[in-house]
């Protein structure tokens, strides 16, 4: 199963190990879920995760290790056609573009309302909690 993961899910996963976001990151690490990334998306991940105050308990070096591991477990998708502007937020458009270019059906985000128009393109935005039942069994 392939997914595009919004930055807010990674932030939540790094804040606590007890939530659905952390479980999704674990499943990506285990190879049960395949994250699809792009260079611009990875740059956004890095910028947000290293932003002052976002993850005060996580060092920049630890963010680098986390992102290196995420990249190793993910598939890079190059974007050749932009769908901008499509959503209200250009950063959200980037996620839709990765999903469309890779044929990925799911964007995992805590912000599903802003992704509602993507459904017309065959891309479903789901919260981490709503996505958990779709995870492969043990």
Image (cartoon, rainbow, N blue to C red):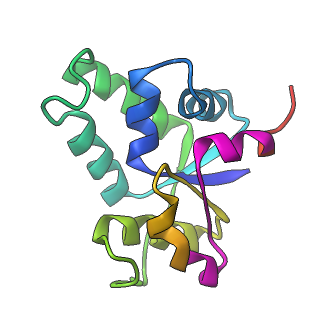
Determine the residue located farthest toward the front in the rendered image: 113
User: Is 84 or 66 nearer to us in this picture?
Assistant: 84
Residue visible at 60% across and 29% down in the picture: 29
Q: Is residue 122 magenta?
A: yes
Residue visible at 55% across and 27% down in the picture: 22
User: Is 88 or 97 nearer to us in this picture?
Assistant: 88
Looking at the picture, does residue 92 appear above or below residue 137?
below
Determine the residue located farthest toward the right in the rendered image: 137
User: Is 94 or 111 nearer to us in this picture?
Assistant: 111
| Whole-percent x, y for residue 50 in the image | 20, 33
Residue visible at 45% across and 51% down in the picture: 6
Q: Is residue 102 left or right of residue 86?
A: right
Q: Is residue 133 left or right of residue 82?
A: right
User: Is 57 or 46 nearer to us in this picture?
Assistant: 57
In the rendered structure, which segment of residues is drawn in magenta?
118-133
Dividing the picture into quadrants, the one containing residue 83 is bottom left
Q: Is residue 57 magenta?
A: no
Looking at the picture, does residue 54 appear above or below residue 121?
above
Dividing the picture into quadrants, the one containing residue 68 is top left
Determine the residue located farthest toward the top in the rendered image: 57
The quadrant of the image that shows the C terminus is top right
| Whole-percent x, y for residue 3 in the image | 61, 53
Answer yes or no: is residue 40 visible. yes
């Amino acid at each position: 199963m392939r997914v595009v993961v919004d930055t807010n899910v990674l932030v939540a996963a790094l804040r606590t190990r007890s939530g659905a976001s952390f479980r999704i990151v674990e499943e990506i690490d285990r190879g049960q879920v395949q994250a699809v990334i792009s260079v611009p998306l990875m740059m956004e991940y890095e910028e947000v995760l290293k932003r002052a105050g976002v993850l005060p308990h996580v060092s920049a070096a630890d963010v680098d290790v986390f992102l290196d591991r995420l990249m190793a477990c993910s598939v890079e998708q190059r974007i050749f056609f932009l769908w901008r502007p499509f959503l209200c937020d250009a950063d959200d458009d980037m996620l839709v573009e990765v999903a469309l270019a890779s044929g990925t059906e799911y964007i995992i985000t805590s912000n599903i309302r802003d992704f509602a128009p993507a459904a017309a393109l065959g891309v479903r935005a789901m919260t981490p909690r709503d996505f958990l039942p779709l995870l492969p069994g043990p």
